[in-house]
Image (tube, rainbow, N blue to C red):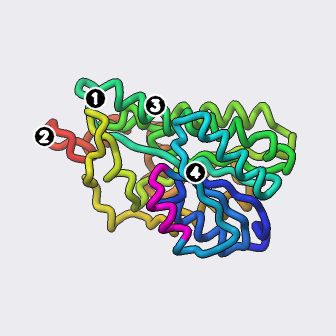
Amino acid sequence: MANFKDKIVVITGGSDGIGKALVHQFLNDGAKVATCGRNNDKLISLSNECASDSLFTMQVDVANQAQCELFIKAVNDKWGGLDILINNAGISMRALVNEVSIETLKNVMDINFWGTVYTTKAALPAIQKANGVVVGVSSIAGYRGLPGRSGYSASKYALNGWLEALRTELYGSGTHVMWVCPGFTSSNIRNAALNKDAKAQGESPMDEGAMMSSEECANHIIEAIDKRKRTLVLTFTGKQTVFMNKYFPAWADKLVNEFFFKNGKLVK
C-alpha cells in the first residue's frame, strides 16, 4: 500500500499475534514501525526476523504511564513525528465473577484500558500535527459482555467509550479515531489470559485452528485504517453477535450462555 510509505506507525504489543502481523505488513508497505512489548527476548527475535532499519523496538509495560511516555518520546526523537498509533497491547482473562480476584480485574483494566489512555495521551500532539490516525484494537467483548471474561469485557467497553469520546472531540479536525473488533482470532491471547488468581492459564479452551489468522486480521485492520473507517467488526460470528445483542438482547443472553457453558460449567 503506497499510502503507508514512509509513514511513522506505532504499534503496542507487537511481539505476538495480531501486533506482530501488523509490524510485518506495515514494514512490507514501506512504513517506519515502532513497537513495544513486555518480553525483551520476543522483541529481539522480532528485530532479527525483520532486520530492518525501519523497525524500532523498546521494552515497555503499557500499564506503566512513565514507560509509555518514554516510548512515545523515543519515537518522536528518532523519526520526528508520528502518523498512526495502533493500541494493540492487551490481555484477556478467564474466571467467573464469584471466583475472580480483584488483582486479575485490575491487571486487565490497567493494560487494556489505561495502557491505551497513557499511550494515546502521549502520542496525540504528534498525531494531531500529522492529521493522523488513532486505533484501538478492541473486541466483540466490547459490544457484548462475555461470561468468564467480565474484566476483559469491562476494559473493552471502556476502551470503546473513551475512543468514541475522543473521536467526537476531534470531529472535523483531520485527526481520525477508530476501533477494530477482531472477533475470535488465532493468537497467544488465550494462553496468556489470566486465571482467577492473576496467573497465566497457559492453555486455550478454544479451537485455535478454526479461527481467523493473525495475518488475515492484520490485513483487514490495515485496509480499515487506509479507508479511515469508523469501526471494524470482523468474522461472521462477531458480526452476528453484535447484531443479535443490539436487536434481540434476551435471545443473545441465552445463546451466549449456551456457547460458553456446558452442564453449568464454563467450558470456553
The numbered disc on residue 65 is none
Question: What's the distance in space between the residues labelled 3 and 1, CA to CA?
Answer: 14 Å
Q: Is the magenta stretch mostly helix, strand or loop?
A: helix
Question: What's the distance in space between the residues labelled 2 and 4, CA to CA?
Answer: 39 Å
Q: What element carries label 1?
A: loop
Which is nearer the eye, 24 or 207?
A: 24
Quadrant that contains the N terminus: bottom right
Is 172 left or right of 21, judged from the image as shown? right
Earlier residue among tags 2 and 4 = 4
Q: Which amino acid does label 2 sit on?
A: Asn
Q: Which residue is drawn at 70% across and 73% down?
A: 29
Is 151 left or right of 2, judged from the image as shown? left
Residue corresponding to mark 1: 100
Query: How many labels sit on residues?
Result: 4
Residue corresponding to mark 2: 263
Q: Do the residues under discs 3 and 1 have CB atoms within 8 angstroms? A: no
**Residue farthest to the left, as pictured:** 263
Vertical position of residue 103 compared to residue 160: above or below: above
Q: Residue at x 48, y 45 (%)?
A: 90
Q: Do the residues under discs 4 and 3 have CB atoms within 8 angstroms? A: no
Residue 252 figure quarter: top left
Residue corresponding to mark 3: 154
Which is nearer the eye, 199 or 191?
A: 199
Which is nearer the eye, 147 or 152?
A: 152
Q: Which amino acid does label 1 sit on?
A: Val
